[in-house]
Image (tube, rainbow, N blue to C red):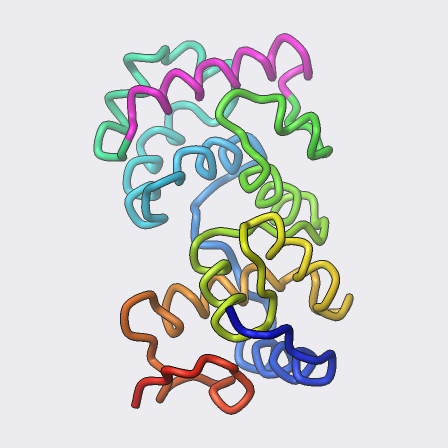
Amino acid sequence: MAKQLSYPVIHEIFTRFRAAEAEPKGELEHTNAFTLVVAVALSAQATDAGVNKATRGLFAVADTPEKMLALGEEGVIEHIKTIGLFRNKAKNVIKLSQKLVDEFDSVVPSSRAALQSLPGVGRKTANVVLNMWFGHPAQAVDTHIFRLGNRSGIAPGKDVDAVERAIEDHIPVEFQHHAHHWMILHGRYTCVARKPKCNACLIRDLCQFEDKTE
């Protein structure tokens, strides 16, 4: 684990990220808050590309909790069976749809606690929805952010909660809204797991990772 980088260095890192892509976007396809919740819940242990492929057909016929309930668990399975853990995920999609209808008037709530009360929605999923749909500076720490945060020194921590706190504590407010998207994309395409593309990295000179590749 690298040491925590200083404020000026982190400010420079995110200034570069912003200059390269001012408005980074999440890669999960969705049409409203409900389809975003479902897409993020389905993305656990799956790639965004794989989820998008499955949900295009699903969301074409079921883009509200009521339509999802009408489709039923077996109907959901037919659409998402290419995704890992599809049976359990289909169960959760139906359960969360029912809970939205019964307890939230079919409206996706905008609080973390309420989101986490939905079946299949953990803290990371809730944070993604809060950030992407409601514009809150919530930080969803996935494997890419965890790796980048620890390698670089941007946000080191022993677990995802510690990395989330480090992002909130050390990344300047002006960058908080897009921080997790910049970090996910950098971790997904540049600071990759096995052989990071250090020669193509725009923060190479600021990163504390010792085993840089050529």
Residue 39 image offset from top left, x and y in percent:
44, 37
Q: Is residue 138 above or below residue 186?
A: above
Residue in front for this viewpoint, 35 or 167: 167
Residue 156 image offset from top left, x and y in percent:
58, 65
Q: Quadrant of residue 93?
A: top left
Q: Quadrant of the C terminus?
A: bottom left
Residue in front for this viewpoint, 109 or 92: 92
Residue 131 image offset from top left, x and y in percent:
64, 49
**Residue 149 falls left or right of residue 193:** right
Residue at horizontal 48 percent and vertical 14 percent from the top: 95
Residue at horizontal 52 percent and vertical 59 percent from the top: 25
Residue at horizontal 27 percent and vertical 35 percent from the top: 83
Residue in front for this viewpoint, 113 or 76: 113
Residue 51 image offset from top left, x and y in percent:
33, 41
Residue at horizontal 70 percent and vertical 80 percent from the top: 6
Residue in front for this viewpoint, 31 or 117: 117
Q: Is residue 147 above or below residue 87?
A: below
Indicate whether residue 23 is drawn in magenta.
no
**Residue 200 falls left or right of residue 111:** left
Mainly helix, strand or loop, the magenta region? helix
Indicate whether residue 96 is drawn in magenta.
yes
Q: Quadrant of residue 188?
A: bottom left
Q: Is residue 69 above or below residue 203?
A: above
Q: Which residues are magenta?
A: 85-106
- Callout count: 0
Outermost residue toward the right in this view: 173
